[in-house]
């Protein structure tokens, strides 16, 4: 089986956006033909040969249970089975091909109905260069990377991700369809890391490379367990408490700084304060009896990399006396 889960896939680039010809020659049985969508160009797929005689098949399109015999030439059909015409050429052409033409086709003897060949058609693009981004949420233990493809190739695509650091190379272990992670990092190195991602499908392959210094891509996950509590006897204060992100492995050796964003209920303009090094803080000069919404973000204390995303909001109201 191929990487796409298809037996013996054929990859042929250069199919026209305006015309796709189906080659249902003998020997294609059970295969899947992958063709490229493009806006210019023209290409014809010839029928195969059987006992040295040219095929003059009738064609059955996807979803069609029966097809009338075409005594001479090739029946042109749409995926739903609509006969578009006949052609004396040993082939089947699909004008104005689109994704709606994908599916399974079969070639039959025009008189006996004997099936001579079957093939499936898939349309798409060779993969473009992957657009890569990497960040270190678990510094200094691991680097996490992800990538995107634009335009989407529309075909199943495999990825191989590797990294290089000086003369050292290694595999970036896939953690999702388009993401990977690697460890064994050298902190404070002035030699850049390079992540290489190669995308491959039946129509081609393309690679992207992202160089980076490890400390430049530090981006912790948001702080966790944020609590907002009133302080007894203090009608204009709130006590905030939180924990470092659990994905940050060594906060005692690589401490974090924090900044706080808060706003009154129904107030669209928040106030941001900080940074602070502790995992608690008291907000002062708040409007008494008013609900406040609070979020916290964090960053490496040495100012390497960037701040995390904001934590999920927590809310609280200053103390209201008896």
Image (spheres, helix red, strand yellow):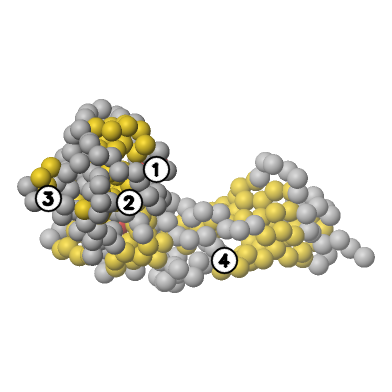
As measured in the structure, the alpha-carbon distance from the residue carrying label 4 to the one carrying label 1 is 58 Å
Residue 81: give its label. Answer: 1
Residue at the (22%, 36%) spot, across then down: 73
Residue 224: give its label. Answer: 4
Q: Quadrant of residue 27?
A: bottom left
* Residues at discs 1 and 2 in contact (Cβ within 8 Å): no
As measured in the structure, the alpha-carbon distance from the residue carrying label 4 to the one carrying label 3 is 70 Å
Q: Position of residue 104 (x, y in %)?
A: 32, 51
Q: Quadrant of residue 3?
A: bottom left
* Residues at discs 4 and 2 in contact (Cβ within 8 Å): no
- Taking the image as shown, residue 132 lies to the left or right of residue 73, namely right
For label 2, the residue is: 104
Residue positioned most to the right: 322
Give neighbour class at mark 4: few <14, some 14-19, many 20+ (Cα, 10 Å).
some
Q: Decide which of tag 3 and tag 2 comes sooner along the chain.
A: 3
User: Is residue 251 visible to the viewer in this orientation of the structure?
Assistant: yes
Single out the mark in the foreground, 1 or 2: 1
Q: Decide which of tag 3 and tag 1 comes sooner along the chain.
A: 3
Disc 4 element: strand
**Of residues 162 and 314, which is closer to you in this image?**
162
Single out the mark in the foreground, 3 or 2: 3
For label 3, the residue is: 50
Q: Decide which of tag 4 and tag 1 comes sooner along the chain.
A: 1
* Residues at discs 3 and 1 in contact (Cβ within 8 Å): no
Residue at the (15%, 58%) spot, across then down: 166
As measured in the structure, the alpha-carbon distance from the residue carrying label 1 to the one carrying label 2 is 12 Å
Q: Position of residue 179 (x, y in %)?
A: 35, 59
* Residues at discs 4 and 3 in contact (Cβ within 8 Å): no
């Amino acid at each position: 089986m191929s990487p796409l889960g298809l037996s013996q896939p054929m990859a042929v680039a250069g199919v026209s956006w305006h015309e796709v010809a189906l080659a249902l020659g003998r020997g294609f049985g059970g295969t899947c033909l992958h063709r490229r969508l493009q806006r210019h160009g023209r290409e014809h797929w010839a029928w195969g040969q059987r006992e040295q005689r040219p095929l003059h098949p009738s064609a059955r399109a996807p979803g069609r249970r029966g097809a009338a015999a075409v005594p001479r030439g090739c029946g042109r059909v749409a995926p739903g089975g609509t006969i578009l015409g006949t052609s004396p050429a040993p082939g089947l052409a699909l004008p104005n091909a689109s994704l709606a033409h994908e599916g399974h086709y079969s070639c039959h003897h025009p008189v006996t109905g004997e099936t001579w060949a079957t093939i499936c058609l898939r349309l798409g693009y060779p993969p473009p260069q992957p657009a890569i981004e990497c960040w270190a949420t678990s510094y200094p233990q691991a680097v996490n990377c992800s990538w995107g493809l634009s335009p989407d190739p529309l075909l199943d695509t495999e990825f191989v991700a590797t990294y290089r650091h000086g003369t050292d190379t290694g595999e970036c272990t896939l953690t999702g369809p388009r993401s990977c992670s690697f460890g064994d990092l050298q902190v404070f190195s002035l030699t850049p890391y390079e992540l290489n991602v190669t995308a491959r499908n039946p129509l081609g392959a393309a690679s992207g490379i992202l160089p980076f210094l490890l400390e430049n891509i530090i981006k912790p996950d948001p702080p966790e367990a944020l609590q907002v509590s009133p302080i007894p006897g203090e009608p204009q204060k709130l006590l905030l408490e939180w924990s470092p992100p659990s994905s940050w492995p060594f906060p005692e050796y690589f401490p974090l700084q924090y900044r706080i964003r808060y706003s009154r209920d129904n107030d669209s303009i928040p106030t941001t304060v900080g940074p602070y090094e502790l995992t608690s803080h008291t907000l002062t000069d708040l409007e008494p009896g008013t609900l406040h919404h609070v979020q916290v973000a964090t960053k490496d204390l040495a100012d390497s990399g960037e701040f995390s995303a904001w934590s999920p909001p927590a809310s609280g109201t200053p103390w209201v006396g008896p």
